[in-house]
Image (spheres, helix red, strand yellow):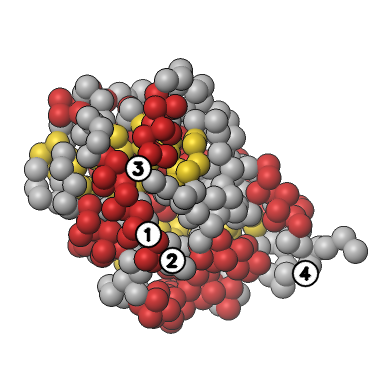
Amino acid sequence: MKHKLLFIIVDRANYGRLMPLILAGYKDNRFIIQTCFTGTTLSDKFGKLINDVSQDGIEVNFQVNIEESFRSHEAMLNTISNGIVKMQELYKKVNPDAVVIIGDRYEALGCAIAAVYRNIYLIHLQGGEMSGSIDETTRHVITKMAHLHFPSTERAAKIIKKMGENPKHIINSGCPVGDLILSSKTNLNSLVPFYSVDNIRITSDDIQKGFALACLHPVTTGIENSLEMVKIIKEFLMSINYPIIWITPNADPGSNSIFKEIKTIPNCHLVVNLNAITFQLLLRNAKFALGNSSSFVRDSTFTGTPILLLGLRQKNRETHKNVTLIEDISVKKLQKGLENILSKPRPNPSFLYGNGKASLEILNGIDNFLNIKPTKQKQLHYSF
């Protein structure tokens, strides 16, 4: 009998990392794969991701609107509450064998709670990682609810074990995004044109001579600091001679202020949403990237793209030598950091976050787990 898996996608980063796994699942006759798009994937403000996924071969089976659009702490709480109520209704209708969730977003938290309290196996990807925002708390909460874990690194797997999770249910698979990056034979010349928020068409010719890629998310425990950061980054970018592709911030509180400030930066193409392949093409071919996105940290390890990692949002992430952390930023520190990374040869890629075979590893692990059907009542596995 085939196992029915329901994948929950809450934002564009979720989608980019889950897409290779979902596509592999479609081809695996051990599974019935269904998707539920929720969170900001349904929002026009964030490019309405569901309108674009068919070009990747992904089917939208269910849409559940849980997102509050006010970008405040209250909106985050309301979104979590909406997720619990609305997702449990979907789970009752679909009756999956397991729900698959990735990462650390508040949008995913309500979805996870609903699955566990409906007595459905919860499968969690990218648990055990450390970072510097409320996302870390959310990530660990989901880990403690999940029945099966697929961390992306060896250190993350050890952390999950130390959290009292059953070692038999922890599989260091690597991140599925590496499957996409390492298998892609495309280059910048094949980049599909995309558009800025002002509907300006951007082609590979516009950025062929070199460009910077930027993304800055607010830190929910220090919104004022996030706004000050973007003002410093603006001054820094105006002092260098590179066109900038800037990906809009996520839905966390404080993003509106960042968005307004970005729009005042000269020679900056602000984009709301990029499909997964376009994003990876840009990250691979960028002269450098800067900001505080976990995608810059994780995905860049597979290509060696130089990264200026700013502030505390990703402070404790595992990084490759292509990443330079600047915690307390200033224009001079950014200029010195850029000079340093551009004066050295581009670092070789790393397999820190996987070897490009994560999807098969994950599907095999899920199949074995569901065939055994362990108890859904979790037990602590601490060594006393």
Tags 4 and 1 in contact by the CB under 8 Å rule?
no
Q: Would you name the residue on which mark 4 appears?
A: 379
Tag 3: amino acid? Val
Q: Which of marks 2 and 4 is in front?
A: 2
Mark 2, mark 3: which one is toward the viewer? Answer: 3
Residue at horizontal 59 percent and vertical 43 percent from the top: 318
Q: Name the residue under label 2.
A: 222
Label 3 Cα neighbours within 10 Å, binned few <14 / some 14-19 / many ≥20: some
Mark yes or no: residue 20 visible: no
Q: Nearer the viewer, residue 211 or 39?
A: 211
Mark 4 secondary-structure assignment: loop
Q: Where is residue 86 in the image (x, y as percent from the top left)?
A: 40, 78
Provide the residue designation for mark 3: 331
Closest to the camera, between mark 4 and mark 1, is 1
Q: Residue furthest top?
A: 345
Image quadrant where one finds the C terminus: bottom right
Q: Whole-percent x and y of residue 37?
A: 35, 62
Read off the residue under disc 1. 226
Element marked by disc 1: helix
Which is nearer the N-term, disc 4 or disc 1? 1
Label 2 crowd (10 A; few <14 / some 14-19 / many >=20) = some
Between the C-alphas of marks 2 and 4, the distance is 36 Å
